[in-house]
């Protein structure tokens, strides 16, 4: 079900699996990637809903949430903090894809005591964006979205997923997509990421061309006690490309937390 939250005078949409969270169950909060929305996690919230409290949010300017979007990861962190507070989700596991991964890392650095764990997917301590993509989003968003949708998934999965990914990214205002890419390009926690003291499961597709495995390995090496899970046969959209493997890794990690 979609719950509409009133935050800072804006309507913020969030897919939740129940009216009121079960205090006994762990809570998973999902943050989508650049230009995405909560439907990016359809293969997760549908399959994990019986065992966890689920909240898959739409960032401002995305999906059914009112805009505008932001241009700094830190501003999105502030929104996610307020959403978690509004939902009444004490110390959730924060799962983030792409810019959502950056948000999870920045959240852990700022307010790690409010989380049980983080699961950054397809992320890194920096998230550089090709200047041609940044410029292209403004000049020819249709072409850029088509290109990104193709390279974002492993070759074997393109026929199955590229069309749906293109359609999804085409729904967002190009200015919002530009802002997300700009926020990623500005993101850099290289000097501070080792200060994270939250349990972390770093996840990467073994065929990710957008945030290659070396970026996830760096996070694993820098964050004390972090685990690294490589998802086989998957690119940047690993949670859709190999949902079974990702869901299993997420479940094991979440159940290991206290």
Image (cartoon, helix red, strand yellow):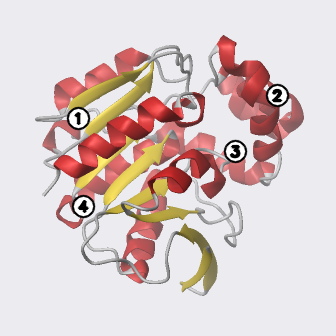
Residue at image point 38% right, 69% down: 81
Quickly name the residue at label 2.
146
Residue 45 higher or lower than 214, as above or below: below
Q: CA distance from mark 4 to mark 1?
A: 21 Å
Q: Residues within 10 Å of mark 1 (few under 14, many from 20)?
A: few
Q: Residues within 10 Å of mark 2 (few under 14, many from 20)?
A: some
Q: Nearer the viewer, residue 28 or 110?
A: 28
Q: For the residue labelled by badge 2, is the local secondary structure a helix, a strand or a loop?
A: helix
Look at mark 1 in the image and give the residue it sits on. Answer: 191
Q: Nearer the viewer, mark 3 or mark 4?
A: 4
Q: CA distance from mark 1 to mark 3?
A: 26 Å
Q: Which residue is mark 4?
A: 115
Q: Nearer the viewer, mark 1 or mark 2?
A: 2
Residue 192 as seen in the image, left or right of residue 44: left
What is the C-alpha distance between the residues marked 3 and 4?
29 Å
> Which badge, 4 or 1, is on the more N-terminal residue?
4
**Label 3 belongs to which residue?**
178
Q: Which mark is residue 21?
A: none
Q: Earlier in the sequence, mark 3 or mark 2?
A: 2
Relative to 92, is 119 above or below? above
Name the foreground residue: 2 vs 108.
2
- Measure the C-alpha gap from mark 1 to mark 2: 34 Å
């Amino acid at each position: 079900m979609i719950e509409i939250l009133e935050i800072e005078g804006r309507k913020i949409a969030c897919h939740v699996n129940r009216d009121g969270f079960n205090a006994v169950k762990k809570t998973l909060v999902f943050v989508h990637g650049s230009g995405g929305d909560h439907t990016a996690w359809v293969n997760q919230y549908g399959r994990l809903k019986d065992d966890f409290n689920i909240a898959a949010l739409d960032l401002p300017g995305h999906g059914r949430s009112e805009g505008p979007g932001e241009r700094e990861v830190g501003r999105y962190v502030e929104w996610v903090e307020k959403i978690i507070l509004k939902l009444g989700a004490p110390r959730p596991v924060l799962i983030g894809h792409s810019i959502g991964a950056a948000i999870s890392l920045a959240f852990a650095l700022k307010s790690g005591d409010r989380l049980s764990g983080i699961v950054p997917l397809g992320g890194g301590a920096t998230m550089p964006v090709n200047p041609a993509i940044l410029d292209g989003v403004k000049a020819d968003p249709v072409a850029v979205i088509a290109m990104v949708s193709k390279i974002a998934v492993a070759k074997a999965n393109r026929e199955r997923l590229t069309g749906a990914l293109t359609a999804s990214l085409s729904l967002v205002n190009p200015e919002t997509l530009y802002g997300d890419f700009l926020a990623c390009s500005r993101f850099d926690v290289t000097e501070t990421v080792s200060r994270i003291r939250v349990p972390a499961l770093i996840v990467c597709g073994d065929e990710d061309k957008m945030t290659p495995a070396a970026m996830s390995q760096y996070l694993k090496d820098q964050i004390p006690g972090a685990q690294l899970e490589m998802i086989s046969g998957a690119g940047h959209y690993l949670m859709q490309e190999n949902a079974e493997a990702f869901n299993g890794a997420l479940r094991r990690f979440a159940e290991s937390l206290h």
